[in-house]
Image (cartoon, rainbow, N blue to C red):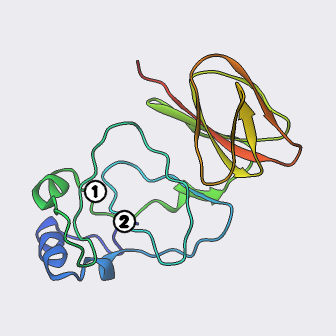
């Protein structure tokens, strides 16, 4: 995520077209339990062998600079217009511990553990174990949207993310 050395936008375009853009990225080592906040405009790619949870503001906007030879549309001009060509700030990478991970202004994200909470207007993403709300159960790999206030049930030791939009 982010480019290694600062990269001129013109060079980004040429590298995207040539497929060498992946060589310009900073590829930090990651392991289970890492939390990485990636600000809008940061170039990012998912490395082989990773399973991750990507939580994003509901915007339906993704600009593709490169797609490993797949026949999907690239969005070079739009991506380069909003590109942050610098390094990803290492201060935005840390181990996820229970509590707030992101706190606004557009959304919040919290890592929670244990028996459960009263929730509403929240997406619940189980990491380990299962959660239940309003009679609906979800486990790892699934997302549970709880629109109305409900009790969230989870066994001790269960960990889950809770994401809330802070915009109307």
> Left of 119 or right of it: where is 71?
left
Task: Answer left or right for 102 relative to 31.
Answer: left
Above or below 143: residue 17: below
| Depicted 73 relative to depicted 40: above or below | below
- Give me the residue at 57% from left, 66% from top: 51
Gap in angstroms between the C-alphas marked 2 and 1: 8 Å
Q: Secondary structure at mark 1?
A: loop
Q: Quadrant of the N terminus?
A: bottom left
- Give the number of marks: 2
Picture coordinates of residue 93 (x, y %)? Answer: 57, 59
86 relative position to 80: left or right: right
| Along the viewing direction, whichever of 66 and 105 lies nearer the viewer | 66
- SS of the residue under disc 2: loop
Q: Quadrant of the C terminus?
A: top left
Residue at (22%, 66%) from the top-left corner? 65
**Location of mark 1 (residue):** 84
x then y, percent, for residue 62: 28, 51
Q: Which residue is mark 2?
A: 2
Could you tell me residue 33's position as x and y percent?
68, 61
> Which one is in front, 112 or 70?
70
Q: Nearer the viewer, residue 68 or 1?
A: 68
Horizontal arrangement in the rendering, residue 17 relative to residue 107 (left or right): left
- Are discs 2 and 1 less than 8 Å apart at CB? yes
Q: Which disc is residue 60 wearing?
A: none
Give the residue at the far front of this rendering: 135
Where does the image place residue 80, in percent across and percent down from the top left? 16, 58
73 above or below 106?
below
Q: Earlier in the sequence, mark 2 or mark 1?
A: 2
């Amino acid at each position: 995520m982010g480019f290694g050395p600062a990269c001129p936008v013109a060079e980004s375009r040429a590298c995207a077209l040539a497929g060498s853009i992946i060589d310009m990225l900073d590829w930090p080592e990651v392991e289970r339990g890492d939390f990485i906040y990636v600000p809008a405009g940061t170039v990012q790619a998912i490395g082989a062998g990773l399973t991750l949870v990507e939580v994003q503001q509901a915007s339906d906007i993704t600009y593709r600079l490169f797609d490993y030879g797949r026949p999907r549309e690239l969005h070079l001009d739009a991506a380069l217009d909003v590109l942050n060509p610098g390094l990803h700030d290492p201060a935005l990478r840390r181990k996820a511990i229970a509590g707030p991970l992101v706190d606004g202004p557009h959304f919040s994200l919290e890592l929670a553990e244990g028996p459960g909470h009263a929730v509403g207007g929240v997406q619940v993403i189980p990491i380990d174990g299962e959660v239940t709300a309003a009679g609906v159960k979800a486990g790892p790999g699934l997302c549970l949207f709880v629109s109305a206030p409900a009790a969230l049930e989870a066994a001790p030791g269960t960990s889950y993310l809770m994401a809330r939009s802070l915009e109307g």
